Amino acid sequence: MSNINEESRSAQGTCAEMGIKMKETENDILETTLSIAEKGYPEAYRFLLDEYERNVEKFGPQTLYFLACLAGGADMPEQALGWMRKAILNHGWWYRPEVLEDDDLELLKDNAEFISLKSISDTRYAEAASRSKAVFSWERKTGDNLFLAVHGNTQNGQTARNDWSRIVGENNGWQLETIQSAEPDGYGTYRWSYDRSSFLPVAEAMEKVQKEGYQKIVCGGFSAGCDMLLRGVAFTPARCDVLLLQSPWIPVLEEDEEALVRGLRQKKIALEIFCGSEDEDCLPMAKRLYEVANREGIDVKFTIQENSRHQFPAGGMQLCQNGYGNILGF
């Protein structure tokens, strides 16, 4: 599942007063599935299938893709084909062409029905890509402080709003807005590319609100969204008061460390880095960013979230306990 892999403390009383409640998200369940898959695909398939059948409406295209890959990897080609049929024909969903070439679907590559399904999906993807545009939810100033949230890959603006609203909550004085990529990943989801253009909608959004009179502007990113924020800081006039990076997947650190350090230092941007202790892909990047920023005299804090993978930490209390509440002033 190579494409699947590409892509939580005086605070307790305050969080309870805010009424933050956490429900296990689809991403949380998929992360658990990945953990189980490391021990064996059949067990992971049964786990995810049970979760799916328990609440079908909760799950979208990514879950059916997981089920197809797990079935394929477990040598169950008919089940794998069935999930693709359900996703593409029954639901009318589609996927980025590359993900349907995953090694776990190798058993289907010469199957006539799968070839037809992939062709349908590829056509839908091309049509969506031709008309897709970035979306910035901000319309006007409605709070004293602004929180700009940037989603990760295989997510969208609403995902970012759902994730970060659990932290920002109903806190008076904070306005939560989102930035959605122009690059479709699959039906209803988007992605970022690690180049000199994909991040521009993020940078433009940050610049747009600079003179709107906010007391404080905090930008929060998840996974690839962190990279887009850092590129904006490194390569454009975009700025904010604090960058809050959750599970940062940040190739820009290796590509242009000097420009990144210069941008953070000159703009006096504080860094708050959070990463799961079991996030094998992103934890080394998070540690490296902390080391570089600390060495260069940048205001930086780093929290490792115990028993967490590539996800927001589970539990409303944990969100505040891990430092978010202090950053936002509650």
Image (spheres, grey):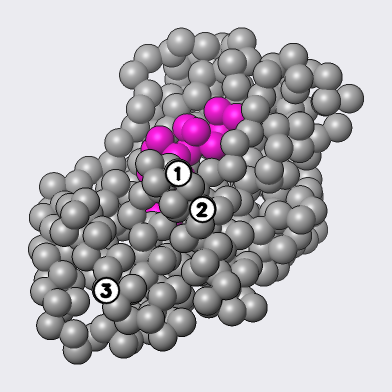
Q: Secondary structure at mark 2?
A: helix
Locate residue 210, reporting x and y percent: 47, 25
Q: Is residue 315 magenta?
A: no
Please say if 124 is above or below 133: below
- Does residue 156 belong to the magenta stretch? yes
Asked if marks 1 and 2 touch (Cβ < 8 Å), the reply is: yes
For disc 3, the neighbor class at 10 Å (few under 14, some 14 to 19, many from 20) is many
Q: Which residue is mark 1?
A: 55
Using the image as rendered, state which of residue 296 and residue 84 is in the foreground: 84
Residue 199 visible: no
- What amino acid is found at the position of numbered circle 2 in the picture? Glu
**Placement of the C terminus among the 4 image quadrants:** top right
Q: In the rendered view, does 85 fall on the left or right side of 149?
A: left
Which span of residues is magenta-colored? 151-166
Three-letter code, disc 1? Asn
Residue type pointed to by label 3: Leu
Q: Which mark is residue 81?
A: 3
| Mark before the other along the chain sequence, 3 or 1 | 1
State the mark number for residue 51.
Answer: 2
Look at the numbered discs 3 and 1 and tell me whether their residues touch, using CB distance below 8 Å. no
Mark nearer the N terminus (2 vs 3)? 2
Res 289 quadrant in image: bottom right
Q: Is 106 or 132 nearer to us in this picture?
A: 106
Could you say whether the residue bearing mark 3 is in a helix, strand or loop? Answer: helix
Compute the Cα span from label 1 to label 2.
7 Å
| Badge 1: residue crowd in 10 Å (few <14, some 14–19, many ≥20) | few
| Residue at the extreme right of the image, as rendered | 10
Residue drawn at x 68%, y 18% as measured from the top left? 19
Q: Secondary structure at mark 1?
A: loop
Figure check: 230 above or below 141: below
